[in-house]
Amino acid sequence: MDKKSDVLLRKLLKNWANRQRPPENERARLIWEAAHVSHSNFELNLPVFRPQYKAYPSASINDWPQTLFSWINENSLQIRFQTRLG
Amino acid sequence: MEAALDTELVFSLQAGSLEALGVLYDRHRGLVFRTALAITGDAEAAADLLHDVFLRLFRFAAHIDPHRPLEPWLYRMTTNLSYTWVKRRQRWLRPLEDIADWLVSGRKDTPAYQAEMDDSWRQVQQAVSSLPLSHRGVVVLYYVDDLSLQEISEILDIPVGTVKSRLHYGRQALKQSLGLLAGEILHDLQYEFT
């Protein structure tokens, strides 16, 4: 293609692509969604500070036999898995 | 913050600054929207992709090198997401669109329909959309975004020789498709926005 028609093609395609403008009202939605993404990333970035055991509801604190039973149950299961994987 | 460099804004973005995201959005949204629109040929899809690209910019800011220009990252993300959109559409929606086209085929002859579709631009749209996706991306980055062959090669992660050959074939195909336009409406179209 010669240079002149190449320039023509460039102008044509540019004009075609510039016919529509980006939406004006999307900024606020982006910021709102990013704020929520930011929140979930914050949670994901803090595994070190998360306790590695399950937190039990405060109502069951006095119910220690049940808590102890659950703890043994879950941890023994975890140990069994680890042994198999190991 | 409005006057801050992209480098500074990316650092702020990495620290979680939503204000920096807003400034980068205002600064680069034209580039992303234009590229997405030219590749997909769909304004609604381009708006969605614009949103998606900047959301990803925010989410993956930690992986971006602030010392390097941001624009190539934006171009890369935009072309990749646009390619994905086009492929999905081809797979799922094209058969439905064919049926819809067939259903309204009688209406296509009416003057009102012709005016509505702005036929001249529609032909340009069709010419670009008929290019294979890989050629389309190169043509858009070269002609619409004014990028060099080297820049396109880096953005699309393909050799310069491949960029040249895709550009050559894309250009030839466009010339053929728009050949009829050259003597009739090309002159009107080229001065409309310049």
Image (cartoon, coloured by chain):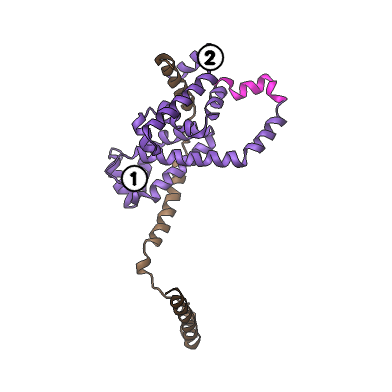
Q: Earlier in the sequence, mark 2 or mark 1?
A: 1
Q: Say which residue appears at 65% left-offset and 35% top-offset.
A: B97
* Left or right: B103, with B193 as reference point: right
Position above or below: B29 against B106:
below
Chain (brown): A
Say the numbered circle drawn on residue B185. 2
- The quadrant in which residue A86 appears is bottom left
- Residue A77 rendering spot, x and y as whole percentages: 48, 79
The question of residue B112 being in magenta is answered with: yes
- Span shown in magenta: B106-120
What count of labels does the image hold?
2
Q: Say which residue appears at 56% left-offset and 15% top-offset.
A: B180
The color chain B is rendered in: purple
Give the overall secondary structure of the magenta segment: helix
Q: Secondary structure at mark 1?
A: helix
Please name which of the two marks, 2 or 1, marks the residue nearer to the observer.
Answer: 2
Q: Say which residue appears at 44% left-offset and 15% top-offset.
A: A5
Position above or below: B38 against A31:
above
- The quadrant in which residue A14 appears is top left
Residue B31 seen anywhere in this rendered image of the structure: yes
* Left or right: B85, with A31 as reference point: right
Q: Secondary structure at mark 2?
A: loop
Quarter containing the N terminus of chain B: top left
Q: Nearer the viewer, residue B119 or B17?
A: B119
- Residues at marks 2 and 1, CA–CA distance in whole angstroms: 43 Å
Q: Chain of mark 2?
A: B
- Residue B168 rendering spot, x and y as whole percentages: 44, 24
Q: Say which residue appears at 47% left-offset and 25% top-offset.
A: B169
Position above or below: B169 against B64:
above
Say the numbered circle drawn on residue B20. 1
Say the numbered circle drawn on residue B107. none
